[in-house]
Protein backbone atom coordinates (compact mmCIF):
# COMPACT_ATOMS: atom_id res chain seq x y z
CA UNK A 1 0.00 0.00 0.00
CA UNK A 2 2.98 2.34 0.39
CA UNK A 3 3.54 2.48 -3.36
CA UNK A 4 -0.10 3.25 -4.12
CA UNK A 5 -0.31 5.92 -1.40
CA UNK A 6 2.89 7.58 -2.60
CA UNK A 7 1.61 7.61 -6.18
CA UNK A 8 -1.70 9.10 -5.03
CA UNK A 9 0.13 11.93 -3.25
CA UNK A 10 2.07 12.66 -6.44
CA UNK A 11 -1.10 12.99 -8.49
CA UNK A 12 -1.09 9.51 -9.99
CA UNK A 13 -4.86 9.30 -10.20
CA UNK A 14 -5.71 12.97 -10.92
CA UNK A 15 -3.71 14.44 -13.76
CA UNK A 16 -5.33 17.90 -13.71
CA UNK A 17 -4.14 19.25 -10.38
CA UNK A 18 -1.13 21.03 -8.94
CA UNK A 19 0.85 18.99 -6.40
CA UNK A 20 1.50 20.61 -3.00
CA UNK A 21 5.07 20.64 -1.77
CA UNK A 22 3.92 19.00 1.48
CA UNK A 23 2.46 16.10 -0.54
CA UNK A 24 5.74 15.77 -2.44
CA UNK A 25 7.68 15.61 0.84
CA UNK A 26 5.30 12.98 2.26
CA UNK A 27 5.46 10.94 -0.93
CA UNK A 28 9.27 11.13 -0.95
CA UNK A 29 9.46 9.66 2.56
CA UNK A 30 6.85 7.00 1.78
CA UNK A 31 8.48 5.87 -1.47
CA UNK A 32 11.94 5.71 0.11
CA UNK A 33 10.44 3.60 2.89
CA UNK A 34 8.85 1.37 0.23
CA UNK A 35 12.22 0.84 -1.47
CA UNK A 36 14.00 0.07 1.78
CA UNK A 37 11.29 -2.32 2.98
CA UNK A 38 11.62 -4.37 -0.19
CA UNK A 39 15.19 -5.14 0.84
CA UNK A 40 14.15 -5.92 4.40
CA UNK A 41 11.64 -8.45 3.06
CA UNK A 42 14.37 -10.17 1.05
CA UNK A 43 13.10 -8.86 -2.28
CA UNK A 44 16.05 -7.76 -4.42
CA UNK A 45 16.09 -4.09 -5.36
CA UNK A 46 15.83 -3.94 -9.13
CA UNK A 47 16.22 -0.88 -11.34
CA UNK A 48 12.49 -0.10 -11.45
CA UNK A 49 11.95 -0.56 -7.72
CA UNK A 50 14.94 1.72 -7.08
CA UNK A 51 13.48 4.40 -9.36
CA UNK A 52 10.44 4.72 -7.11
CA UNK A 53 12.67 6.52 -4.63
CA UNK A 54 13.23 9.27 -7.24
CA UNK A 55 9.61 9.86 -8.32
CA UNK A 56 8.97 12.68 -5.88
CA UNK A 57 12.07 14.47 -7.10
CA UNK A 58 10.81 14.27 -10.70
CA UNK A 59 7.43 15.71 -9.73
CA UNK A 60 9.15 18.54 -7.87
CA UNK A 61 11.59 19.29 -10.70
CA UNK A 62 9.09 19.21 -13.57
CA UNK A 63 6.13 20.72 -11.64
CA UNK A 64 3.77 18.10 -13.08
CA UNK A 65 1.73 15.26 -11.59
CA UNK A 66 3.44 11.90 -11.92
CA UNK A 67 1.31 10.71 -14.83
CA UNK A 68 2.42 13.71 -16.90
CA UNK A 69 6.01 12.47 -16.46
CA UNK A 70 5.18 8.88 -17.34
CA UNK A 71 7.34 6.95 -19.80
CA UNK A 72 4.97 4.01 -19.77
CA UNK A 73 3.84 4.52 -23.34
CA UNK A 74 7.41 4.18 -24.61
CA UNK A 75 8.08 1.22 -22.32
CA UNK A 76 5.10 -0.68 -23.72
CA UNK A 77 6.36 -0.27 -27.28
CA UNK A 78 9.93 -0.96 -26.23
CA UNK A 79 8.87 -4.38 -24.93
CA UNK A 80 6.87 -4.99 -28.10
CA UNK A 81 9.89 -4.30 -30.32
CA UNK A 82 12.14 -6.43 -28.12
CA UNK A 83 9.78 -9.41 -28.41
CA UNK A 84 9.45 -8.81 -32.14
CA UNK A 85 13.22 -8.85 -32.63
CA UNK A 86 13.57 -11.95 -30.46
CA UNK A 87 10.89 -13.70 -32.50
CA UNK A 88 12.65 -12.85 -35.77
CA UNK A 89 15.93 -14.15 -34.40
CA UNK A 90 14.40 -17.55 -33.69
CA UNK A 91 12.29 -17.61 -36.88
CA UNK A 92 15.36 -17.48 -39.14
Image: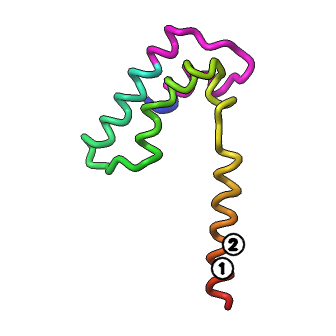
77 w.r.t. 82: above or below: above
Q: Which residues are magenta?
A: 6-26
Label 1: state its secondary structure: helix
Which residue in the structure is indicated by mark 2? 84
Residue reaching furthest to the right:
16
55 w.r.t. 44: above or below: above
Which residue in the structure is indicated by mark 1? 87
In the image, residue 32 lies in the stretch drawn in magenta: no
Q: How many numbered marks have been drawn onto this rendered protein structure?
A: 2
79 w.r.t. 66: above or below: below
| Disc 2 to disc 1, C-alpha distance | 5 Å
Contact check, label 2 and label 1, Cβ < 8 Å: yes
Quarter of the picture holding the N terminus: top left
Given residues 74 and 23, the one toward you in this image is 74
Label 2: state its secondary structure: helix
Residue 76, percent from left and from top: 67, 54
Q: Mark 2 Cα within 10 Å, few/some/many (few <14, many 20+)?
A: few
Would you identify the image quadrant in which residue 30 lies? top left
The mark found on residue 49 in the picture is none
Quarter of the picture holding the C terminus: bottom right
* Residue at 65% from the left image edge and 37% from the top image edge: 70
* Residue at 55% from the left image edge and 18% from the top image edge: 60
Amino acid sequence: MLLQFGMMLLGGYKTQRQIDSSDISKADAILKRYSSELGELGIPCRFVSHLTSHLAEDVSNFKNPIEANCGLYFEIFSGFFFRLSAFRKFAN
